[in-house]
Every structure is written in C-alpha cells, then in structure tokens.
Image (cartoon, rainbow, N blue to C red):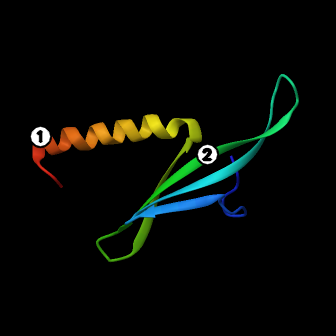
Amino acid sequence: MVDEAKEKPVFTVRSGRVKAAVWANRITDTETGEIRTRHNVSLTSSYKDKDGNWHESKCSFWLDQCLPASAVLTEVFNKYCLEYGTP
C-alpha cells in the first residue's frame, strides 16, 4: 500500500469524527507485468482519551470491499438498535 505519510489521498469524505480517504496504489500485475492503479480506502475514527487528548483508530479496505463493509456496518447498527435502542 501507499506510504500515506508521503502521498496525498485522491479525495476524502468526513462525517463527524469518521473520515474516509481514498488512496491510489501503483501495482504490477504478476502475470502480465502491466503497471496499473488500484485504490484502497482508509477509514479513520477520531476519539478523545480520558485526559482529553485526541487519537485516531484506522483500518483499510480495497475499494471493492467498501459496499460489503457498509452492509456489515449497517447490519451491526440495526441489530444494536433493536437490542439496545438508538445509541
């Protein structure tokens, strides 16, 4: 994957304390030797610790995993709301 400290994302989207950044990755096809671009998404959640210091938690997905991840997160949220009520 791209060294995100040196590269800039293709674009970012933010909702509250959650941010998604799309990154372009140059990869070489092992069969053809062709260089192409594949994109991944880093999802970052910002939070404060007990001392009031900000931190980030991050995970990454290939772009083609975004819709399945969204479906799973929606299902988790819905199950939580049915069991415990809206957070």
- At label 2, the amino acid type is Asn
Pinpoint residue 5: horizontal percent, then vertical percent.
67, 63
Question: Callout 2 environment at 10 Å: few (<14), some (14 to 19), or many (20+)?
Answer: many
Q: Is residue 5 left or right of residue 72?
A: right
Which residue shows up at 11% across the image and 46% down it?
84
- Compared with 43, 30 (above or below) is above
Pinpoint residue 63: horizontal percent, then vertical percent.
58, 41
- Compared with 60, 20 (above or below) is below
Q: Which element is circle 2 on?
A: strand
Picture quadrant of residue 64: top right
Which residue shows up at 68% across the image and 46% down it?
1
Picture quadrant of residue 28: top right
Question: Callout 1 environment at 10 Å: few (<14), some (14 to 19), or many (20+)?
Answer: few
Which residue shows up at 11% across the image and 40% down it?
83
- At label 1, the amino acid type is Glu
Marks 1 and 2 in Cβ contact (< 8 Å)? no
- Compared with 19, 38 (above or below) is above
Q: Could you tell which of marks 1 and 2 lies nearer the N-terminus?
A: 2
Q: Which residue is mark 1?
A: 83
Q: Which element is circle 1 on?
A: helix
Point out the image quarter for the C terminus. Answer: bottom left
Q: Is residue 70 left or right of residue 35?
A: left
Along the line of sight, the residue nearer the viewer: 5 or 85 = 85
Could you tell me how far apart the alpha carbons at marks 1 and 2 are, in whole angstroms?
33 Å
Q: Is residue 36 left or right of residue 20?
A: right
Q: Which residue is mark 2?
A: 40
Q: Residue furthest top?
A: 31
Pinpoint residue 60: horizontal percent, then vertical percent.
54, 46
Q: Which mark is residue 24?
A: none
